[in-house]
Image: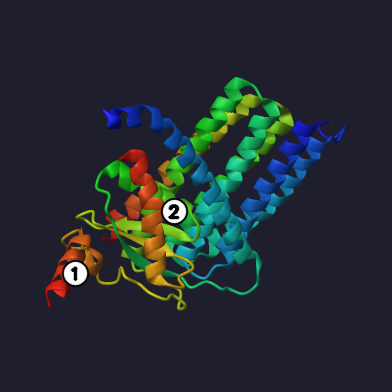
């Protein structure tokens, strides 16, 4: 349904999705492989940024601007998660 | 028409910046250099894609919300990076072997919860300078 | 009197100029980091250096450290307990004193102008 008429915007969104999915795989490989826990936190943070980008693309693709609220919430949760992990590491090992 | 072109360019360049960030996170040798790319390029990429949303819809509420998200990202990304970097240094994460200088070495006193300022403290620098002048 | 005048009429311009400067620095930072990621050899010389601070208040230190994190190849790590030194991780250290002076002259002076 989305792909029936391929306009410029839809092509741009789909190619952006393609690039973002490749980057998701790269970030996920760092999440699995990361030698220490802070590496994994950095990779997780990057994955959430990529998800914000995916939501932005999806908002344009479906033309429903209400999805932008999800991006707000996701950015907030990413920040809280990062801070919580950092504080956890500090309390746990120091 | 021109608006669609601007929107498409912003979308694709934002995605490319995010790809650069992911590639850097995989390729760079130690945690701190990885954090450089993960903070700068990833936040810049998501900001570009959100700008594309604002350009595409172009009504006031969406633009306001986008500016809110962008402001929020710029405010929180450095704080998160600062906290992770600090705790990683405290845990003794190894630096890359090509690291030139480490002035943070032996400055932490973990038991006393103090980070001393060392030889670059402005007060001690002024003292040294006055000593040099008198001698 | 002159100070009040300056605060009322100059502050908005200073803030707008500061935001534009911030965006320019962010863009340049991204281009440089992207160049280093995409070329196959690592040309960087990373290291941790200390920057003596002249600014005192919490707000100014926060603004400066956020700005440092978002500009080319530098990342703020920690502030000493007595708030006189900021430790940063930099990616391209060719000349330590030059980098220190550059951060103090360019960024810290601007932060002082806007928030001071």
**Image quadrant in which the C terminus of chain B is located:** bottom left
- In this rendering, the label closer to the viewer, 2 or 1: 1
- The picture quadrant where one finds residue A28 is bottom right
**Image quadrant in which the N terminus of chain B is located:** top right
Image point (46%, 47%), residue name: B77
**Image coords of residue C73 (percent x, y):** 49, 61
Q: Which type of secondary structure does the marked residue at label 1 adopt? A: helix
**Image coords of residue A42 (percent x, y):** 48, 56
**Left or right relative to A43: residue A87:** left
Chain to which mark 2 belongs: C
Give the residue at mark 1: B129
Nearest the camera: C101 or C47?
C101
**Image coords of residue C96 (percent x, y):** 39, 70
Nearest the camera: C9 or B111?
C9
Disc 2 crowd rating (10 Å Cα; few below 14, some 14-19, many 20+) is many
Q: Which mark is residue C69?
A: 2
Q: Label 2 vs label 1: CA separation?
A: 31 Å
Image point (39%, 28%), residue name: C9
Chain to which mark 1 belongs: B
């Amino acid at each position: 349904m989305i792909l029936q008429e391929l306009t410029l915007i839809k092509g741009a969104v789909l190619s952006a999705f393609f690039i973002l999915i490749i980057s998701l795989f790269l970030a996920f490989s760092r999440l699995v492989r990361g030698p220490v826990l802070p590496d994994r936190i950095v990779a997780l943070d990057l994955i959430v940024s990529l998800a914000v980008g995916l939501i932005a693309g999806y908002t344009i693709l479906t033309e429903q601007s209400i999805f932008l609220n999800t991006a707000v919430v996701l950015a907030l949760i990413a920040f809280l998660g990062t801070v919580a992990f950092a504080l956890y590491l500090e309390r746990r090992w120091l | 028409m021109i608006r669609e072109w601007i929107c498409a360019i912003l979308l694709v360049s934002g995605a490319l910046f995010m790809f650069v960030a992911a590639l850097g996170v995989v390729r760079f040798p130690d945690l701190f250099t990885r954090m450089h790319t993960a903070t700068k390029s990833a936040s810049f990429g998501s900001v570009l894609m959100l700008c594309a949303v604002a350009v595409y819809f172009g009504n006031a509420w969406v633009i306001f919300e986008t500016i809110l998200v962008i402001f929020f990202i710029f405010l929180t990304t450095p704080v998160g990076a600062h906290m992770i970097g600090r705790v990683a240094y405290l845990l003794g994460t190894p630096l890359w072997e090509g690291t030139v200088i480490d002035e943070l070495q032996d400055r932490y006193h973990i038991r006393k919860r103090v980070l001393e300022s060392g030889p670059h403290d402005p007060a001690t620098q002024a003292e040294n300078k006055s000593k040099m002048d008198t001698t | 009197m002159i100070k009040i005048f300056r605060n009322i009429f100059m502050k908005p311009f200073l803030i707008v100029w500061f935001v534009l400067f911030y965006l320019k620095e962010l863009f340049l930072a991204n281009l440089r980091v992207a160049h280093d990621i995409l070329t196959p050899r690592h040309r960087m010389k990373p290291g941790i250096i200390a920057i003596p601070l002249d600014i005192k208040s919490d707000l100014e230190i926060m603004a400066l450290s956020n700005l440092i994190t978002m500009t080319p190849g530098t990342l703020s790590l920690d502030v000493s307990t007595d708030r006189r030194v900021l430790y940063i991780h930099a990616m391209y250290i060719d000349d330590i004193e030059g980098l220190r002076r550059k951060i103090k002259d360019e960024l810290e002076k601007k932060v002082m102008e806007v928030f001071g």
